[in-house]
Every structure is written in structure tokens, then in C-alpha cells.
């Protein structure tokens, strides 16, 4: 009996290795949630800075200058800005990669379409996927337009963000691209904030109404705040 037990132990397959955090579905969802909240914090700060344009060129250009010297004298010129950029870029990449891999995993798990899909779930999924693609393309255009100035119309002026913003929103296509992207931001924030709350264990039946209200309020305020800038330029309020 002892020999049989010993033989069984020798022939038994080794235990499967524990899956890493990133390899698991929960790990990817957690990375997606945390990176999404980092980007949400950036959007809140960004829209607050953008609205300074309504106080005139001196105020807005001064804000642009502060971004380059924030953290001084502890940090050297633009170090604080580059730390923020690298953090944001890391969050964007982590968010996009985890979203793509979760989407691929979901498709592999159900290679054939469901006969009856839940309308709400399907709509939210499509909105998040296509919204993410739209925002990814917009980020590239936005950086090339107002940071690098390579696709900017009207002559990019380094250190004069007020004039650069007016140049961009003085063209019909600049307004269309920006407004469509900001509508996508609103939808993405609305669905993403709720999903992040569920993933991180914050959401429950008792808090559902409050979380939905907060998600809708954030989406509305951010969308309205961002769109106010091109509308201000188009209407002549900002000139």
C-alpha cells in the first residue's frame, strides 16, 4: 500500500503554476480601471485649465507657462510637465492594451454570436470600443496640432497657446474633430466610471444610484467644459 502511494506521488503531474496578476481577467480589468481613473483625473484638471481661455490671452498663456515651470525650484524646467506626460502616456498604453486583450479574450470565449444579446450590454461594449478608437486617433491629432505644431493651421507659435487654440478652432474641420472626440469622451467616461467602480469593488446595490449620478454628472460637465472652448471661438466670445 505504501509503495502504491509512493508510486502515485511520483507519477502525478506537477501542480499548475499560479497565474500572474496581469494574465488574469481580473488583473487586466483592474489595470484598466486604475489607468482609466488616472486619465479621468487628468481630464478634470485639463478642462479646468482649458476654461481659463475665457479670461483672456494673458491668463491662458500664463497657465501655459506655469505648466512648463510647475514643481520649480525643486524640479528643473519642464520636468514636472514631462512627469505628467509620461504618467499619462503610461496610463493610456496600459488602458488600451488591457482593453484590447480583454476584447480578444471575450471573442475567443464565444466565437459564435449570441442569438439574443442584451441591448444595454451590447451598446455599452460598442460605445467603449469605438469610443476608445476615436479617442486614440484624436490624441495623436491633438498632440501634433497643439503640442508639436506639425499639423497646425495658421502658423504654430511656441509659448502662445491662446493664439494656437484660436487658429485650430477657426477651421471647420478643427471644430468637427474636437467636438466629435469630446462627445466620445463623455460617453467613455459615463460607461467607464461605472465599470471601474464595479471592478474595484466600490459599487454595490446601495450605492448604485449615487454612482450612476456621479458618472452622468462627470460626463456632462467634462463634455460641456471641453466643447465650450471651440463654441467660444466660433461665436466670437474668445477672439
Image (tube, rainbow, N blue to C red):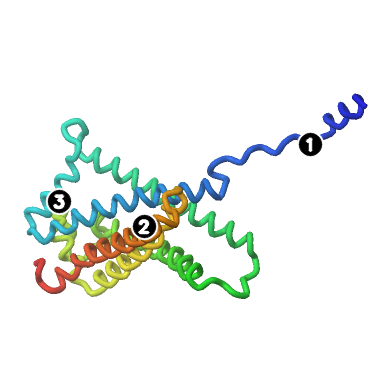
Quarter of the figure with the C terminus: bottom left
Q: Is residue 49 visible?
A: yes
Q: Give the quarter of the image for residue 144.
A: bottom left
User: Residue 78 versus residue 151: which sits nearer the camera?
Assistant: 78
**What crowding class fits label 2: few (fewer than 14 Cα within 10 Å), some (14-19), or many (20 or more)?**
some
Element assignment for label 1: loop
Q: Earlier in the sequence, mark 1 or mark 2?
A: 1
**What crowding class fits label 1: few (fewer than 14 Cα within 10 Å), some (14-19), or many (20 or more)?**
few
User: Residue 33 versus residue 149: which sits nearer the camera?
Assistant: 33
The residue under label 2 is: 211
Q: Say which mark, if any, is on residue 159.
A: 3
Instruction: Please report the residue visible at 16 percent of the width from the left and 50 percent of the height from the top.
Output: 64
Residue 180 left/right relative to 102:
left
The residue under label 1 is: 13
| Picture layout, residue 45 above or below residue 183 | above
User: Residue 229 versus residue 188: which sits nearer the camera?
Assistant: 188
Instruction: Please report the residue visible at 72 percent of the width from the left and 36 percent of the height from the top.
Output: 15
Instruction: Please report the residue visible at 42 percent of the width from the left and 63 percent of the height from the top.
Output: 133
| Picture layout, residue 13 above or below residue 111 | above
- Residue 22 position within the rendered picture, expressed as x and y whole percent measured from the top left: 53, 44
In the image as oriented, which residue stretches furthest toward the top? 2
Nearer the observer, disc 1 or disc 3?
1
| Picture layout, residue 121 above or below residue 193 | below
- Residue 177 position within the rendered picture, expressed as x and y whole percent measured from the top left: 30, 69
- Residue 148 position within the rendered picture, expressed as x and y whole percent measured from the top left: 26, 54
Q: Earlier in the sequence, mark 1 or mark 3?
A: 1
State how far apart marks 1 and 2 are (Cα): 47 Å
Amino acid at each position: 500500500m505504501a509503495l502504491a502511494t509512493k508510486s502515485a506521488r511520483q507519477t502525478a503531474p506537477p501542480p499548475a503554476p499560479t497565474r500572474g496578476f496581469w494574465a488574469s481577467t481580473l488583473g487586466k480589468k483592474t489595470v484598466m480601471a486604475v489607468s482609466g481613473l488616472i486619465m479621468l483625473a487628468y481630464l478634470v484638471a485639463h478642462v479646468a485649465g482649458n476654461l481659463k481661455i475665457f479670461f483672456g490671452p494673458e491668463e491662458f498663456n500664463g497657465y501655459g507657462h506655469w505648466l512648463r515651470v510647475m514643481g520649480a525650484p525643486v524640479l528643473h524646467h519642464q520636468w514636472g510637465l514631462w512627469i505628467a506626460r509620461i504618467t499619462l502616456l503610461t496610463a493610456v498604453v496600459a488602458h488600451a492594451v488591457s482593453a484590447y486583450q480583454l476584447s480578444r479574450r471575450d471573442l475567443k470565449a464565444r466565437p459564435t454570436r449570441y442569438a439574443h444579446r442584451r441591448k444595454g450590454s451590447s451598446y455599452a461594449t460598442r460605445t467603449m470600443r469605438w469610443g476608445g478608437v476615436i479617442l486614440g486617433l484624436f490624441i495623436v491629432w491633438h498632440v501634433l496640432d497643439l503640442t508639436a505644431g506639425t499639423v497646425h493651421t495658421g502658423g504654430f507659435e511656441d509659448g502662445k497657446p491662446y493664439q494656437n487654440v484660436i487658429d485650430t478652432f477657426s477651421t471647420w474641420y478643427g471644430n468637427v474633430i474636437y467636438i466629435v472626440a469630446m462627445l466620445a469622451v463623455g460617453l467613455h467616461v459615463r460607461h467607464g466610471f461605472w465599470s471601474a467602480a464595479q471592478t474595484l469593488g466600490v459599487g454595490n446595490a446601495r450605492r448604485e444610484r449615487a454612482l450612476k449620478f456621479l458618472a452622468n454628472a462627470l460626463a456632462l460637465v467634462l463634455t460641456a467644459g471641453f466643447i465650450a472652448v471651440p463654441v467660444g471661438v466660433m461665436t466670437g466670445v474668445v477672439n
